[in-house]
Amino acid sequence: MNPAGNDVHPRPGEQAGGEPEQGQITGLTRLLELQREAGDREAALATARQVLERARRLPAHRLTVATALRELREELITGELWDEAREVAVETVQAYAALSAEDPDQRFWHALALDELAGIDLKLGEPAGALKAVLTSTGMYRALAGEDPAYYRPELLRSLHNLRHVHRELGRLGDAAGAMRQAVDLCRATRDDDPGWTPKLARALDCLGRDLEESGQTEASVAAMKESVALYGDCPDSEEVRADIHERLGIALNAMDRSAEAVEAAAASAALLRGIGDPGRLATALHNLGICLQNAGRTAEAVEAVREAAEILQRLYDADPGWAAGLAGALGYLGLLRETCEQFERAVTSGERAVSLLERLHASGDGDHGHELAQTLHHLGRYHERLERPERAFACLERALALYGELAQRAPDRFRSGLAGAWVAQSVYLALLDRPEEAVAAAQLAVDLYGATAPAGTEHRAGMADALSHLGDRAANAGHPERAVRAKGRAVELYEDLAALDPDRYLGRLADELDSLAVRHCDQEDHERALPLLERAAAIWEDLGRDGKLAVTLRRQLLVLSCLHRDTEAMTDRLLEVADDPVDAFTTLGEQLIGVQHREAALEHLIRAATLWEIVAMGQPDAPPAPYARALSLMATCLDDLLRLDEAVAAQRKAVEILTAVVGEEPEHLPLLSWALGELADYLRQTGRSDEALGHRRRAVEIDSGLAARDPALHRRSLAGSLTDLGHLLADLGDQAEAEGVLARARLLTATLPEAEQAP
């Protein structure tokens, strides 16, 4: 069965029989066709009205009227006269409903009229009315397809796609997916006998994948997209749609942390687009590929992909400045990747270029780029920090804060957390600039901003916890230990809640914060409170298998146990088992114990560190000696404090000998050698061997002079100190003339230092 035996509905005049109006209707219908072909829409609309007017004079010929209504409806839609078009569409549906009740051959045209009515309802913002019409027409197509599958299954498939569209307009993604599942089933059943339905099945699966993805059914969505793209592989001229599906598939798989599959899909999209020759889409695909590669831990490859994307976008931008936003986005992400690779200078170059583009876009008012500019400045500040340029980092954050402030004024709920995060970063830079009270104020402002923002889930609480952690650090640095403990305590409470909700993400952060709170208690010499915090942090690190972190926490436990005068043997053995570098672990512990005046315990651990190095060196003759020298120098410090001066001299002399032997091949140790020589001179002077000390003092001055000549900004202060110490030693030895000359040189050099570096 098919409608009237052909694909084209009869013209109105062809159904009028021998009535007097027949000739007029036929002539007007042909005129209407000519006017349409000529593009004279106004005349065509007037003619369509005349056709309907003549048809209404033939009440016995209802099909003629129905067809004339369809023609007028078409012209009204073309002219976007939607209200009148709906009135005519309703009348058309009614006309075909009456006809189909008497003649089953008219059911198709009845269903088609319902489809047209649904389209008009969508244009008028009435999706509920459209849904009612499409549900009815789909049922009719299903019945027709049961009677004549070859002819009507394509119509049923089209109707299911229409039904999906209406459900999506209503936000009913589950029902939209249901319509597409029916479409997929229909296509599968038909494709078994007709392989020509392969593209239709591929399209239905693609649509189903979109609906499932948007409704949060990611696993099912990925399965549908994978089958769709595989089917499209058998279809000619499908490269563009396959590239699109591969791109979406890569994004979905990346969000699911199925990194290897995500990279494969994103790479397939880029390869297809490279072959198509669409540079704009290729740049986007390469950017997405970079994101997937980074998530897969393949950062070097990610850099190359995003660098190529930026190069393509640069060429497009050179020809058309409209590509500025895309280029800025690629450069911004390239900066982040280069930061991950510790290519900080290159990260700065990418970041500064992105900022320049975004500043021009923001100033021109061409789109809303304020947030992106603020974020990029925030990142650029961090790159400068990593390069030890706190002044430039601070300047970047000042600009970012101004932008975030404007954004938060317009949309507080959306941007207040971004403003708070920027203040956290600025607190770090203020601390690096030795402005501790301002750093505390900045961190407190971040906490206050998070507090003023309505809680919006784990991200908000994590932001507040991070701000409180930084407030604790800034307060401790500024000499406010009680405030530091309060802030750190609140941070721990928040991380406790977060770790309960998402342990994979926040359990390690909780352990970090427990460790940090313990340090703050140690600052107040409250080691009893510090110990259980460290024990809990150690248990977490052990459960997570993070031996590096565990070693740091165990070292702090040893420090606390020593301060509490408790047995440390078991903990010492545990640290030996866990530490990747036990020499460094015990040397650092000894240094920390010196700082809290536990010299006997410090000496014990430093001797252990030196012994461990000697054991390692027996098996590895090329083991780097600098760690050994460091342990020996710290041992000398302990021995000096314990008034065991001859032993201090012996330990320090050995450290000097070791450093002297390595600086030829490793000149980076020259500053350490200069310091070690100065310490040895002091110990010799205390034992009454000032003459011997003098040679070491002169050698230290010689080293510092060479270093200062190469990098004055970094080494002038050390040279001034070495000259001062040499001058005092010469004075003690009675060489007043040389002493005065050396001290005068030291004073002159000190006067050239920045005020912050001058001795008080």
Image (tube, grey):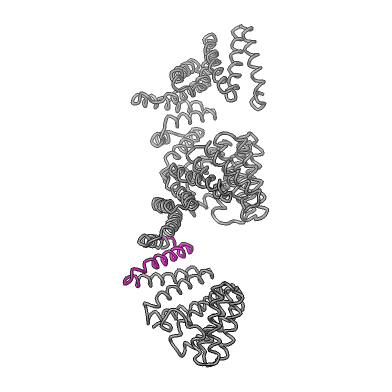
Quadrant into which the N terminus falls: bottom left
Above or below, 288 against 187 in this view is above
Residue 444 appears in the figure: yes
Percent across and percent down for residue 484 are 60, 41
- Residue at horizontal 58 percent and vertical 25 percent from the top: 714
Depth order, front residue of 228/691:
228
- Count how many numbered circles sit on residues in the image: 0
Depth check: give the residue in front, 498 or 218.
218
Q: Position of residue 366 (x, y in %)?
A: 63, 52
Q: Which image quarter is the C terminus in? A: top right
In the image, residue 663 sits, relative to residue 375, either above or below, namely above
Instruction: Determine if the magenta segment contains residue 285.
Output: no
**On screen, residue 426 above or below 64:** above
Q: Is residue 406 left or right of residue 205?
A: right
Who's the residue at 43% across and 69% down the image? 180
Q: Main secondary structure of the magenta part?
A: helix
Q: Is residue 757 left or right of residue 620?
A: right
Q: Percent x, y for residue 26?
A: 53, 85
**Residue at the left extreme, as displayed:** 193
**Left or right: 612 as drawn, with respect to 672:** left
Q: Note whether residue 464 is visible.
A: no
Q: Please state the horizontal and vertical placement of residue 405, each as a whole percent of the image.
A: 66, 49
Give the camera-side residue of 624 and 147: 147
Residue 284 higher or lower than 427, as above or below: below
Q: Which residues are magenta?
A: 190-219
Front in this rendered view, residue 129 or 459: 129
- In reply to whether residue 213 is colored magenta, the answer given is yes
